[in-house]
Image (cartoon, rainbow, N blue to C red):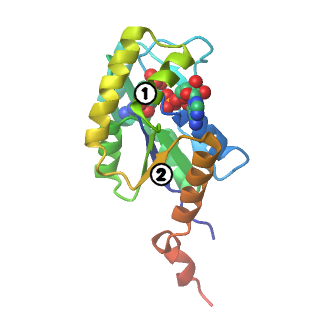
C-alpha cells in the first residue's frame, strides 16, 4: 500500500529564494518531484528549455489555455506562466509529492480546485534584502526589479490563504523547514486513512 502524493504550492516574491530553498529541500528526496512550468518569458542567461521552464511563444500558450492543458495560469510582470496539467496528475497518481513554484493568482486557482493542496509562502527577511538579492542575482534590469518589488507588496496583501510562511534568512534552515512540512503533511491522518481500512 502506498501513500497518496501531495500537491505542494510554493509562492513568494521573485528573489525571495524559492529556487534556492526548493533545490536544497528536495536534494536526496526521491518522494518529491518538481513541476516545470510553461512561460512566454524569454530565457535568462544559463536557463535551459525544459529545465527551468518550457519556453513558448504567446500563441502556443494561448492554445494550451484553450485546450485545457494547464492546471492554472497567470500573468506576472507582462509575461504568462502556467502549470502543465498532465504531468502533475500523473505524478500524484504515482504517489509522488509534486512541488509547484507559482505566483499568488495561480496558487489561489489551485486552492479553489484542490483545497487539500499545501500552500507555502516564502519571504525574505525584509524588502531591502529582497532588492539586494534581485540586484545580486544580476538577471533583471533596474526597471524589471522595480516592477518585481511592486508585485511583491501586492502579493503580501493577497497571501492570506497560505498554510505556512517560511522566512528565508538562512537558506539551509528554510530548506530544512520546507522538508519537514512536506514530511508532516504526508503523515496527516486524512492522507493515510486508507492504511486503516486494510483487511486483516
Ligand atoms: P526566486 O526563485 O524566489 O526568484 P532565487 O532562488 O533565484 O529566488 O534567489 C534570488 C537570489 O537570492 C539568488 O542570487 C540567490 O542565490 C540568493 N539567495 C537565496 N536565498 C538566500 C539567502 N537565504 N541568503 C542570501 N541570499 C540568498
Ligand atoms: P520568474 O520570471 O522569476 O522565473 O518567475 C516569476 C514568477 O512567476 C514567480 O513568482 C514564479 O513563482 C511564477 N511562476 C512560475 N511558474 C509559474 C506557473 O506555472 N504559474 C504561475 N501562476 N506562476 C508561475
Residue 196: numbered disc: none
Q: In which quarter of the view is residue 24 placed?
A: top right
User: For the residue labelled by badge 2, is the local secondary structure a helix, a strand or a loop?
Assistant: strand
Residue 103 in the image: state x and y as whole percent: 38, 35
Q: Which residue sits at x=35%, y=16%?
A: 146
1 lies left or right of 4: right
Q: Is residue 142 above or below residue 28?
A: above
According to the image, label 1 marks what residue? 128
Q: Please tell me how many numbered marks the rendered image carries.
A: 2
Identify residue for label 2. 7
Pair 1/2: label in front: 1
Which quadrant contains ligand 1? top right
User: Percent x, y for residue 49?
Assistant: 58, 18
Locate the N terminus and report the quarter of the image it occupies.
bottom right
Residue 69 visible within the image = no
29 relative to 51, above or below: below
Residue drawn at the location 65% of the way across and 44% of the way down = 172
In the depicted structure, whether residue 24 falls above or below residue 176: above
Seen in the picture, residue 128 relative to 197 is either above or below; the reply is: above
Q: Residue at horizontal 39%, vertical 56%? A: 163
Q: Residue at x 33, y 38 (%)?
A: 104
Amino acid at each position: 500500500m502506498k501513500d497518496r502524493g501531495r500537491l505542494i504550492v510554493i509562492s513568494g516574491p521573485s528573489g525571495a529564494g524559492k529556487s534556492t530553498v526548493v533545490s536544497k529541500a528536495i536534494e536526496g528526496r526521491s518522494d518529491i518531484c518538481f513541476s516545470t512550468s510553461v512561460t512566454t518569458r524569454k530565457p535568462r542567461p544559463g536557463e535551459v528549455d525544459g529545465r527551468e521552464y518550457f519556453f513558448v511563444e504567446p500563441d502556443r500558450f494561448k492554445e494550451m489555455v484553450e485546450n485545457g492543458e494547464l492546471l492554472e495560469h497567470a500573468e506576472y510582470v507582462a509575461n504568462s506562466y502556467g502549470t502543465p496539467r498532465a504531468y502533475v496528475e500523473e505524478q500524484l497518481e504515482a504517489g509522488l509529492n509534486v512541488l509547484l513554484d507559482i505566483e499568488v493568482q495561480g496558487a489561489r486557482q489551485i486552492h479553489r480546485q484542490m483545497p487539500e493542496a499545501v500552500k507555502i509562502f516564502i519571504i525574505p527577511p525584509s524588502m531591502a534584502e529582497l532588492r539586494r538579492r534581485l540586484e545580486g542575482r544580476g538577471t533583471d534590469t533596474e526597471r524589471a526589479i522595480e516592477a518585481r518589488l511592486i508585485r511583491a507588496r501586492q502579493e503580501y496583501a493577497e497571501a492570506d490563504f497560505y498554510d505556512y510562511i517560511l522566512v528565508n534568512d538562512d537558506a539551509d534552515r528554510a530548506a530544512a523547514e520546507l522538508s519537514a512540512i512536506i514530511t508532516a503533511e504526508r503523515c496527516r491522518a486524512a492522507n493515510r486513512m486508507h492504511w486503516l481500512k486494510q483487511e486483516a
